Each structure stands twice: as structure tokens, then as C-alpha cells.
Image (cartoon, helix red, strand yellow):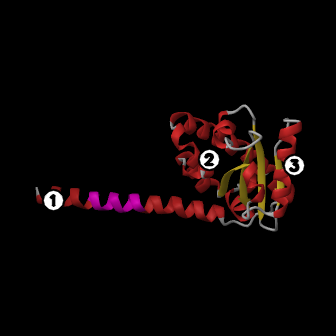
């Protein structure tokens, strides 16, 4: 009986230690894969940002629409900081991307790069005159890329987030760090 108890205790300890080791091995493997040296061209970076931007902006738009519809009294808060929505916080963590919703009021924002302010004004002009704007990717400096996509003017987001504006206008701003993109990329899956 003592041998059986001793055997059960030993196997329990062994299995629990082995489980932790397995988890650490997976994390270590993931970290090694992320820190591998990769040759990534500028075209591959742009392609990746475009692909991720489309996916993230669609998810962000659906999540924000759902949040505004469910809690209309909190629309102002969520519009100013959409990353408070759990799904968007998870996307931020997964992709290393900053997610913002810009409106007409942001043309005077001090956090935007000058190039972004010009782009925002161009999108605003387009929204007033020809509301058929497309997605856009800009390189802001050596380490940052921004993906912008307009929200359709008749969308609930524009109605809730741009209430005090002349033009019902909203624009998704996804700010990517090149280092985070390269870290996440799988070198074998890069398109030439």
C-alpha cells in the first residue's frame, strides 16, 4: 500500500512538472520562431499591412457597431477609445497595432503625424464631395505604417461617433510598428 501511494505521488509530481516543461517548451519555441532572422522586403510589409488592415478594420467595425447598438448611452466613450472593447484589445495585443477611430474633429489632433492630417483632410473632402474613398497605407517614418479605411457615411458608427459634425465622417486608423509585423511574420509564408 505504501508503495502504491508513493508511486501515485511520484507520478503526480512528475506529470505536473512535465506539463510545465511542455508549456515552457511551446513558449520558447514560439519566441525562437519570432526572433529568427528574416528578410522582408518593403513590398511584403505593405502587402501584410494591407491584408491585416482589411481584416482588423472589418472586425473593429463589427465590434464597434455591436457595442454602440447594445449600449447607445456609452457610444461617445467607445468612439473615442475603441480599444476598450475586449475584441479590439485582443487584436491590439495579437498584432501590435494601435486602433483609433478618427472623425472630423481629429484634423486638429496633435497626436497625428503631419502626413496623417493631410490624409485625413483629403478623406474628409472626399466624404463631402465624392463618398467613394478607398483604403490607404502610408509609411510615416522608418518604423511606422498606418492603414486607413473610411466608415460608410450611412453606418451607425458615423451617426453615433460624429454627431456634432457637419459631415457624418469616420475613419479607421490602424498604426503598425514594423518590428512587430516582422516578429509576427512567418518567413516561409511570405509572398514574393
Q: Secondary structure at mark 1?
A: helix
Q: Which residue is mark 3?
A: 122
Q: Is residue 1 above or below residue 168?
A: below
Is 87 magenta? The answer is: no
Q: Is 143 left, or right, of 20 in this rendering?
A: right
Asked whether 185 or 133 is in front, the reply is 133
Mark drawn on residue 3? 1
The quarter of the displayed image where residue 145 is located: bottom right
The span from disc 1 to disc 3 (Cα, nearest Å) is 79 Å
User: How busy is the neighbourhood of tag 1: few (under 14 within 10 Å), some, or many (20 plus)?
Assistant: few
Q: Residue at x 57, y 38 (%)?
A: 68
The span from disc 1 to disc 2 (Cα, nearest Å) is 64 Å
Q: Secondary structure at mark 3?
A: helix
Q: Is residue 71 above or below residue 36?
A: above
Is 18 magenta? The answer is: yes
Q: Position of residue 97 (x, y in %)?
A: 67, 56
Q: Residue at x 66, y 52 (%)?
A: 99
Tell me the quadrant of the picture where the N terminus can be found.
bottom left
The span from disc 2 to disc 3 (Cα, nearest Å) is 21 Å
The quarter of the displayed image where residue 93 is located: bottom right
First in residue order: circle 1 vs circle 2: 1
Q: Position of residue 28 (x, y in %)?
A: 54, 64
Amino acid at each position: 500500500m505504501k508503495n502504491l501511494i508513493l508511486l501515485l505521488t511520484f507520478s503526480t509530481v512528475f506529470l505536473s512538472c512535465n506539463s510545465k516543461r511542455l508549456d515552457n517548451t511551446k513558449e520558447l519555441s514560439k519566441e525562437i520562431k519570432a526572433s529568427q532572422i528574416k528578410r522582408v522586403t518593403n513590398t511584403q510589409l505593405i502587402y501584410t499591412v494591407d491584408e491585416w488592415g482589411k481584416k482588423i478594420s472589418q472586425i473593429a467595425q463589427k465590434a464597434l457597431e455591436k457595442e454602440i447598438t447594445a449600449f447607445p448611452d456609452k457610444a461617445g466613450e467607445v468612439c473615442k477609445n475603441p480599444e476598450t472593447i475586449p475584441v479590439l484589445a485582443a487584436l491590439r495585443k495579437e498584432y501590435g497595432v494601435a486602433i483609433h477611430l478618427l472623425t472630423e474633429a481629429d484634423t486638429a489632433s496633435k497626436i497625428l503625424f503631419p502626413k496623417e492630417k493631410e490624409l485625413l483632410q483629403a478623406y474628409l473632402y472626399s466624404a463631402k464631395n465624392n463618398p467613394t474613398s478607398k483604403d490607404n497605407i502610408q509609411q510615416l517614418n522608418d518604423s511606422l505604417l498606418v492603414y486607413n479605411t473610411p466608415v460608410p457615411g450611412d453606418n451607425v458608427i458615423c451617426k453615433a461617433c460624429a454627431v456634432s459634425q457637419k459631415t457624418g465622417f469616420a475613419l479607421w486608423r490602424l498604426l503598425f510598428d514594423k518590428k512587430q509585423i516582422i516578429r509576427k511574420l512567418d518567413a516561409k509564408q511570405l509572398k514574393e
